Image: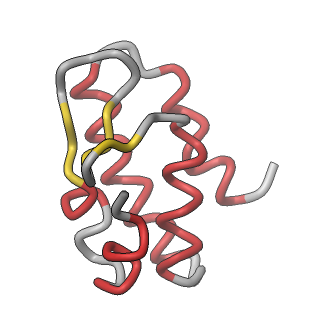
Amino acid sequence: MSPLQAAVSPLQCAVFPFQAAEFLLQAAEFLLQAAVSPFQAAEFLLQACECPVQDGVLLLRDTVLPIRLELIISRLDTRSIEALKV
């Protein structure tokens, strides 16, 4: 398992939306420290959590708790944020 996969694997075990949200923020920090490009980090997080993106909002599974992409990747390059918006 790669460091990137290890960083997001606990997300699959997250029971509550708030746990998943907190984990995504922690994973974003880890990915930045792993020296991957901002776009790779953002793309990997979105693929790993397998959540739909609607109108620039990441929806955690089928919950009503939306998390704005800006929040999740707030420390990533702003060009990545714009590139990932639907």
User: Relative to the observer, which residue lies in front, 4 or 78?
Assistant: 78
Question: Which residue lies at the image location 29% right of the left edge and 83% below the top edge?
Answer: 78
- Is 69 positioned to the left or the right of 7 in the image? left
Residue at point 31% right, 53% down? 25
- Left or right, 81 with respect to 4, comes to left
In this picture, residue 32 sits left or right of residue 79: right
Quadrant holding the C terminus: bottom left
- 81 up-or-down from 26: above or below: below
- In depth, the one of 43 and 4 nearer the eye is 43
Q: Is residue 82 left or right of residue 9?
A: left
- Quadrant hosting residue 85: bottom left
Front position in the image: 27 or 82: 82
Please tell me which residue is depicted at 31% across the width and 33% down the height of the picture: 59
Picture colour scheme: secondary structure
Give the percent coordinates (x, y) of residue 38. 47, 80
Above or below, 16 against 70 in this view is: above
Residue that extends furthest to the right in the rendered view of this protein: 1
| Residue 81 location (% of width, % of height) | 33, 73
Quadrant hosting residue 29: bottom left
Q: Residue drawn 36% across and 41% down?
A: 23
